Amino acid sequence: MRQRISFIVMGTVLAFALAAPPAAPQPAAPIEQGFSLDARVVLNAYQALVEQELAGEILGLKALAATEEARSGRWARIKGPLAAFAEGEPDAAAVVFSRPDGSYFSVEKGLTGETLKDRGYFPGLMAGHDVEGVLVISKSTGKKAVIVATPIWAQGKVIGAFGVSTSVEKLAAQVDRQLGLPKGVVFYALDAQGRTALHRDSALMFEFPSELGSETLSEAVQEMLSKPNGSVTYQFRGARKAVVFQRSEATDWVFALGHTIAAPPP
């Protein structure tokens, strides 16, 4: 995975780690005193890491889709360039070439015998639209993954598509290493349906937080999905959390960063 913007994170994480939460937060501004300013800088860095990774994959696929090999629509000509692309994506769960009928080839397996026609994103992709940030269980690997894909155009029509499914567990782990945040800090992202796309705790990925038994968390999720940015507090697993969030225009995900302001009793 590409190493990006760590020079930003190095300075901001220290400020974030040293920023003490208010001793007695007031209801009107539970986060904005002493925590929010530093948190939003790190939140921007976290969002940028993820978006730039996905954007880099899209740009690479677009460059590949513009080649004569891709526009031929023939796997015999496509597999070499696609394999070379896959070598630069070590965290990808799968790199594939799809035909308009939904059948597809992967670098590892060739023609898979599976179909992408039943994927919700596939009609839009075949209509000529890029895909970025769609969550799936990879048919090739069975892993939790995020999809980016781009159509291949030839003679004025879409003759196929290239796609990458990236392991969300590997993506979250890489982000965690890049950010180097203290243990008490949580980061996650929700897709447009309110499902957890990324989380520092991998066990919570692809879960719906609104269904995890906390009424205050369910209310916080509703607020996060309805606003472009803001801050929320909620109870989860006996701890009170303070979180700042913002929506990404690129992926339509809500990125969130927070910490514990009241821990459960020992």
Image (tube, rainbow, N blue to C red):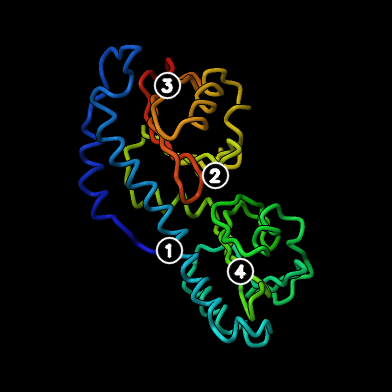
Question: Which tag is nearer the camera, tag 3 or tag 1?
Answer: 3
Would you name the residue on which mark 2 appears? 197
Label 4 and label 3: CA atoms lie apart by 41 Å
Q: Residue at x 49, y 39 (%)?
A: 201
**Disc number lying in front (4 or 1):** 4
- Tell me if 252 is positioned left or right of 213 in this view: left
Side of 36 where 47 appears, left or right = right
User: Circle 3 is placed at which residue position?
Assistant: 233
In the image, residue 181 lies at what x, y percent?
A: 32, 41
**Upstream in sequence: badge 4 or badge 3:** 4
> Earlier along the polypeptide chain: callout 2 or callout 4?
4
Packing grade of label 2 (10 A; few <14, some 14-19, many >=20) is many
Residue at left 76%, top 60%? 117
- Can you see residue 120? yes
Residue picked out by circle 1: 1
* Three-letter amino acid code of the residue under disc 2: Ala
Kindly report which numbered mark, 4 or 3, lies closer to the viewer in this rendering. 4
Q: Secondary structure at mark 2?
A: strand
Q: Which mark is residue 151?
A: 4
Residue 102 pos. (x, y %): 75, 66
Disc 4 and disc 3 in contact, CB within 8 angstroms: no
Alpha carbons under labels 2 and 4: distance apart = 24 Å
The reply to whether the C-beta atoms of the residues labelled 2 and 3 are less than 8 Å apart is no
Q: Secondary structure at mark 4?
A: strand
- Residue 98: x %, y % from top left: 69, 70
Q: Which residue type carries mark 1?
A: Met
Q: Looking at the picture, which amino acid does disc 4 mark?
A: Pro
In the shown orientation, is residue 196 left or right of residue 52? right
Residue drawn 59% across the image and 38% down it: 195
Amino acid on which the number 3 mark rests in the picture: Thr
